[in-house]
Image (cartoon, grey):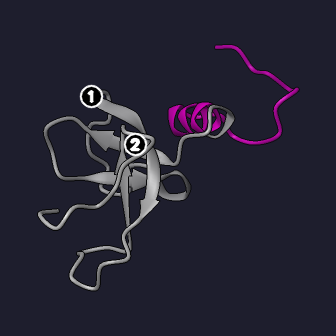
């Protein structure tokens, strides 16, 4: 086992993914074919398999009928439609 004394924070897959997302302007992860996404600050809160998730952009959802006040989409220019 290798120990790296240069890193003071604990490096995990989640921290590696978070660093990549942050460096590339993404706001979280979104699962293909599923209605779920997670924010950059709270990746994989459900402890689900994230290997099928894709980087996504965080968008605010101003609709009072929305389940959440944000959505993660692979579309950088996502706009909420009346059917969402």
Mark 2–mark 1 distance (CA, rounded to whole Å): 10 Å
Vertical position of residue 63 compared to residue 52: above or below: below
Residue placed most toward the observer, 8 or 35: 35
Residue range (magenta)? 1-21
Q: Residue 1 in the image: x percent, y percent?
A: 64, 14
Specify which label sits upstream in the sequence, 2 or 1.
2
Q: Which mark is residue 29?
A: 2
Q: Which mark is residue 52?
A: 1
Element under disc 1 = loop
Q: Quadrant of the C terminus?
A: bottom left
Residue placed most toward the observer, 28 or 70: 70
Classed neighbour count for the residue bearing mark 2: other residues with Cα under 10 Å, few (<14), some (14–19), many (≥20): many
The answer to whether residue 3 is magenta is yes
Residue placed most toward the observer, 83 or 19: 83
Element under disc 2 = strand
Vertical position of residue 64 compared to residue 11: above or below: below
Vertical position of residue 56 compared to residue 70: above or below: above
Q: Is 47 left or right of 77, judged from the image as shown?
A: left
Residue 63 in which image quadrant: bottom left
The answer to whether residue 11 is magenta is yes
Q: Which mark is residue 2?
A: none
Say which residue appears at 46% left-offset and 54% top-offset: 58
Q: Residue 18 in the image: x percent, y percent?
A: 58, 40
Name the residue furthest top.
1
Q: Residue 80 in the image: x percent, y percent?
A: 29, 61
Q: Is 20 left or right of 32, judged from the image as shown?
A: right
Q: Is 57 left or right of 32, judged from the image as shown?
A: right
């Amino acid at each position: 086992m290798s120990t790296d004394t240069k890193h003071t924070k604990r490096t995990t897959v989640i921290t590696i993914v978070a660093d990549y997302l942050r460096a590339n302007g993404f706001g979280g992860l979104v699962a293909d074919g599923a209605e779920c996404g997670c924010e950059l600050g709270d990746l994989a809160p459900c402890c689900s398999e994230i290997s099928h998730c894709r980087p996504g952009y965080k968008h605010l959802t101003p609709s009072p009928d929305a389940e959440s006040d944000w959505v993660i989409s692979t579309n950088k220019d996502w706009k909420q439609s009346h059917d969402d």
